[in-house]
Structures are given as structure tokens and as C-alpha cells.
Amino acid sequence: MKILEELKQKKVNEILSVVKLSSLLFSGIALLRCFLGQKGSQINLGSSYFILLSAVTITLLIALIYSIWAFSTVRRADLKFMRKAQLVEIALFIIIFFISILITGGYNSSYKFLFLFIIITTTIQSGMRQGMTTAFVSSVIILGIDLIGTTPGQVNLYFENDLILVGIFILTAWTLGFYVKIEGEHIEMLTIQANKDGLTGLYNHRYFHDTLREKIILSERYNQPISMIIMDIDYFKHYNDLYGHQKGDEVLKNIGILLKKISRPEDIVARYGGEEFALILPNTNENEVIKIGEHIRRNIETTYFEGEENQPNGKLTVSVGISVFPDKAKSDIDLIKSADDALYRAKFFNKNRVEIYTSILDELKQDIEEKHIDLVTSIKTLISVINAKDKYTYGHVERVVVYCRLIADKLGLSEDDKKTLIYGAYMHDIGKINISEDILNKKMPLTNEEWNILKQHSANGVEIIKPVDSLEYISPLILYHHERYDGKGYPHNLKGEEIPYLVRILTVVDSFDAMTSNRPYNKRKTYEEGVEELRRCSGTQFDPEIVEEFASVILENKDRIGK
């Protein structure tokens, strides 16, 4: 809608520029008549002064023609500048038309109609108020010329016609201004319908994305941060199942009203989709947005919603994810993705909490040599590409990392081993960058040839990180995470304790998430079914001790990690 409005405005400006240029052309004709020595001028001016006045006027005309043309082709970015420039433009036109009328006869000039051009263009561009003001000033000038230019006792035969012309000025400005006002209100109504969510009255998903791109550009221009909040209603499906979608819609409406009250005037509040809401907070740093996010979470938690006592946690609550541009993200897409990752972590860790985005890459940079930082940044880009290619396993890396943090604490791993496990989990599938999207997303069973290609991803992953000496210690987790406890895995058929301990942990975690996530080739299992499958394969595919430890972690936390 905004693009269409901009295109329409551009066309209107082009037409108005032609009208303005035409009016200047008529003024030029008036001056040309004087230079050619035609009769009609009633002013008594000395020759040198007349030549000077004409030269100045012609110069103004040429300068104004160039200015109008240039002004009509630039993007209207600064509203204050635009208004000032339009006022200057109107004043210049009025001066030029006034001079043209004086030169061509004063009160008996046939060029008084020139004011009609600037009245029309001003009304269309700036509305009724500006148009009526221009019409009034033009009327005063014409009637003033009549009164001042007529000698005492002389009858001005043109005064009656000029009164009619003044009436036309006022009527034109009023009628056209009223039409412009009605059209503006109609466009505003259509814009609201196009940009607002019909249920909550907040901005919709499309407007949110369009505005975010604009805010990012302004943020870069003025070197100011932009923060984003993405929030999700906890156990909303449970609420809808209990009370129906109509009651659920009431909750969405009430949260929308609450967000409007809490948010600042400059914030953009949108319904992002389903039970998700999002806020863009211009010129807001990390510390400020954390306070705002916590304020929103606490307000929703303490607000009573009908039937909330039957929610799993006895309250209707939200989980909140936060990210900041440019500190945590380098683009609008990056900002959304990072805030969404933070939201996922908030949902995962007990819900009803605020999480700020933290990148494993930032942790990793502290543990590697400075000369390798750019290579690690490239690795992050590769992982993002893999997530985009493999749509069925979106979020797989993030979930595996979260599971690894939980099991690492359960097993009491040292800080060094914990970091190694987490970094390995983050990069374990990096070799998939060389696997085609058709194979990754194939719904039918893979052929032998396709399976052999897929199995190469672990070795490919090691080759990708090989240039980074500081990452050599995580190579085993990338290379061996598909080995089996019974020796039937790949790529080297390692068996039992031949497989490094951290790799055996990652294998359990990786397989569990694959079983409990949407995949093209199998039905998603519940957490209980996933644990049961791990136990069924304990001693063959997985290390039995690790399976039991991980099973206890999942069963202890299943209520808080389920959406």
C-alpha cells in the first residue's frame, strides 16, 4: 500500500510540476511582450530600471524552472524541509506573477489568471488551509493593484471582473481543498485497513517488516541502535483447547490493548502472527529494552485473563525474546532471526521470562585466535545458509545446543568440556552446505547414491573448519557424531569407548532432536516417545549411561520445554 501511495504521489508531483512550468511559460510570454515593445504596460518606470527589473525576473524564472524540475525528482525524505521549501516556492511564484501583472499593464493586465495556477497546485499539494491562504493573498494582491493603480476620480472598469476572479480563486481553493481532504481521509482509511491487524488493531506482519527496513536505514544513517522484542503467549494452544478460539481472540485483543498502553509513542507494535507479538523500539539500547521487556512480561502476568487459573502455570503469561541492531544483528532479517532465537530460549527455559539474544559465535570468538575471527564469522554464515536450505530442520542447531547445555550440567562436565560440547553442537552439521536442497528435503527414502552423498557431510564439515587451527579440538564432534555404539555407524565404524565421550553425548542429543522434530521422512515423536526410542536403541546405537542421564533431563524438564 505504501509503495502504491508513493508511486501515486510521484505521478501527482510530476503533473503539478508541468502545471507550474506552464504557468512560468505564461509569465515568460508576458515578459517577451514587453521586450518586443507591445503596448499594455501602464507603469511609469525609467528605462534602466525596467531593464534591470526584467533581467532579474527572467533570472528568477530560469532559476525557478530548474529548481522545480530538480525538486520534483528528489525523494521527499525530510518533512520539515519539504514544508519550508514549498512555502518558499509559493512565495516566489506569487512574486513572479505579481511582477508579470505589473509589467503587462497593472490593473488592466490580462495575466491576472496566473494566480490560479499556484492556487490549484498549492491546494493539491498542501490541502485546503494552504490553498485558501494562497487564494486570499492572491486576491489581496489583485484588488490592491486595482485600488492603488487607479488615480482619484478614475473609474476602474476591471474591478468588477476582478471581484469575480477573486471569487473564482476562493471557490477553487475551497472546492479542490475539500476534495483533497475527502480523498486523503479515504486513503488513510484504506492504509489503516491494509496495515492493521483486524483482530487486535495493532500493525500487521507486512507493515512490521516494511517499517523495520526503513528504521534500519535510519539507524545506520544516524548511528542509533534499534531494539526488537518478539513475544509469544505461553500454552496458548492449551487455552484455546479449553475455552475455544473466541475466548482466545479476546485474550489476543486484550494483550494488544495492553501493549498499546505500555509502549512508547515512537515504538511500532505489531501482531506478528498467531499468538506472537513484536515491537520495534527505535534508539533503544540493550539495557533499556531489557527493562521494557520485563515491564511488559510483568504487566501481562499480573493482568487477570478469564480462565487463566486453568493454565499449566496458573497464570496467562508470555515469553519474551530480545535482540539489538547493530550489536547483535547486522540486518533486518538478522534482527528478527536473533530475537526469535532468544524467544525460543525463553520458551525452552521455563517460559514466562525475558531472554536477550546471545550468540555462540560471540562466546567462540573469545576462545580462538584473532586472526581466525573472520573465518568463524563465515562459518556462522554457512550455518545460516544450511538452516535456510533444510527447512524441515529449522532451529535444529539451536535446540541441540540448548539440550547440550542441560546434559552438560547434569553430567557435571568441566567448563572446557562444556564449551567443546556446545561449540561442536553448533557446528556439527556444517558439512551439509555441500549437500543439495533436494536431498536434504526429500520426502521419499534416499537412494543408495543419495545416502552416500549425505554421509559425506561429517567429513566435509571437518574440511571446512580445518583452516581454523583454534577449532581443531572440536573436529571429532563434527566427524564422528554419526558413529554408533555398536560400531555400525560412519565414517570409521568406531565402537564403544573408541568414540570420544563428548561425541557420544552429542550423538544422543542430535538423534533425540531429530526424532522429536518435523522431518520429511518420519512422523514427529513426542518427548516420551523419543525417550522410549533412545532406550530401545541403548547399547546398540547409543551409550547406555548417557541415554539414562539424558532421559532423566528430558523427563524432568518436559513441562517447561514443550510449547
Image (tube, helix red, strand yellow):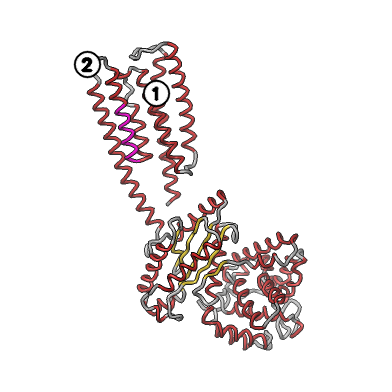
| Residue annotated with mark 2 | 155
* For residue 562, above or below residue 21: below
Residue 226: mark: none
- Indicate the position of residue 253 as horizontal and vertical percent values: 37, 67
Q: Along the line of sight, which residue is nearer the eye, 292 or 496?
A: 292
Mark 2 to mark 1 CA distance (whole Å) = 27 Å
Q: Quadrant of residue 342?
A: bottom right
Q: Give the range drawn in magenta.
A: 127-140
Residue 219 is situated, as x and y percent measured from the top left of the image, at: 54, 52
Label 2 element class:
loop
Q: Is residue 267 part of the magenta span, yes or no?
A: no
Chain-order first, disc 2 or disc 1 = 1
Instruction: Answer with left or right where residue 60 lies relative to residue 504.
Output: left
**133 in the magenta segment:** yes
Q: In this view, does 175 lie above or below 52?
A: below
Which circle marks residue 27 in the picture?
1
Residue at image location 42% in from the left, 32% down from the top: 89
Q: Which amino acid does label 1 sit on?
A: Ser
> Callout 1: few (<14), some (14-19), or many (20+) C-alpha neighbours within 10 Å?
many
- Residue 222: x percent and y percent? 55, 49
Q: Is residue 449 visible?
A: no
On the rendered structure, is 259 left or right of 146?
A: right
Task: Answer left or right for 549 relative to 169.
Answer: right
Q: From where the camera sits, is residue 136 visible?
A: yes
What is the magenta segment's predominant secondary structure?
A: helix
The image quarter containing residue 485 is: bottom right
Q: Residue at x 38, y 20 (%)?
A: 30
Q: Residue at x 69, y 67 (%)?
A: 364
Mark 2 residue type: Val
What secondary structure is found at the residue carrying circle 1? helix
Image depth: mark 2 or mark 1 in front: 2
Q: Nearer the viewer, residue 159 or 535?
A: 159
